[in-house]
Image: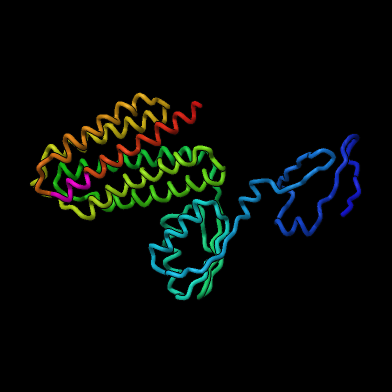
Amino acid sequence: MRRKLVRQGKSTLTVSLPKKWIEKNELNEDNDVEIQEIKNILQISLDSKVIKKNKEIELFLSSEHNKVIKLILRMLYKLGYHKIKLNFKDESTIKKIKRIIRNHLIGFEITNFSNSNCIIENITEPTDTKIEKLKLRIFHIISNCFDLLIEDLKNNITNNKEQIINSVESIDRYSNFCLRSHSQNNDNKMFSLSQLYTFLIFLSHSFRYLYENSTFDNNIDLKLLQIVKKNKKLFNRIKKGYFSNDITLINSSLSQLYNLLYENAIKLDSKNFSLNYFICEIIKNTYYLTGPTISLIMLSES
């Protein structure tokens, strides 16, 4: 394929790109292309951002169970797909898909659907600034969950159950959104970031499971309340250490969390077994959070 060079200005020569190639890749005047010089050859290719934007997949839902659909969509979302076509047998499946998108996938919308399939597309791309704000927001929400739990333990009542559940769902959405961004940017910290969001999600879900499976009554041991207060303090120290790149704050929290779990919470003689169990889970997941936070600080300094 030959193209004639066209002079533009005093020292610039331009060449037009093939129409079919432009249409196939949905390019316009606002897009960039990458030009690489290899000896006497100029290689023109799609900008990496355009390639990511055009990442598409089509699949058939062999199972229409809500948890299976949620698992598939969250995985494709975090892997950076821009357009997803889902085929299914039961037309009621579309309601499940809509609910999952609304509760878990920020920036995704159903753009077309019928009784047997639907097309889901990304309409909002995450930015680095937004990711940092959302990451901080996730830590703030969990810190607030500690406050809500402490308040209810003091009053022997589960007044804040609905607020806890809403908080957990927000953390799920924000974490998925952040992981999608890191995946698209081929972040070299991806493994540690994945661990960070995973343990933040596990930690937040521990609060939800506690409220869904425990009762608060007058038999609550006051030592349990003090343990939760100590756990909140150590979580906030991890948060401060992570966002200020201070490993010493996290290291000191690590040993204290270990002792809090194995020297205090587990040995506590409580009649409310379920409540005691999930508070141990909260401490354990806070403890696990120290690993990726330390790793990410070390990676940012290397």
Q: In the image as oriented, which residue stretches furthest toward the front?
A: 39
In the rendered structure, the answer to whether residue 56 lies left or right of residue 301 reads: right
Judging depth in this view, the residue of 273 and 172 nearest the camera is 273
Residue 220 belongs to magenta span = no
Figure check: 36 above or below 164 = above
In the rendered structure, the answer to whether residue 262 lies left or right of residue 119 reads: left
In the rendered structure, the answer to whether residue 217 lies left or right of residue 106 reads: left
Figure check: 285 above or below 256 = below
Q: What residue is at 51 percent from the left and 69 percent from the top? A: 60
Q: Position of residue 147 (x, y in %)?
A: 25, 40
- Residue range in magenta is 273-279
Q: What residue is at 45 percent from the left and 49 percent from the top? A: 176
Q: What colouring style does the render use?
A: rainbow
Q: What residue is at 13 percent from the left and 37 percent from the top? A: 223
Q: Position of residue 193 (x, y in %)?
A: 45, 40
Q: Position of residue 91 (x, y in %)?
A: 46, 75
Residue 276 belongs to magenta span = yes
How many marks do you count on the picture? 0
Judging depth in this view, the residue of 173 and 248 nearest the camera is 248
In the rendered structure, the answer to whether residue 231 lies left or right of residue 189 reads: left
Judging depth in this view, the residue of 125 and 34 nearest the camera is 34
Figure check: 136 above or below 91 = above
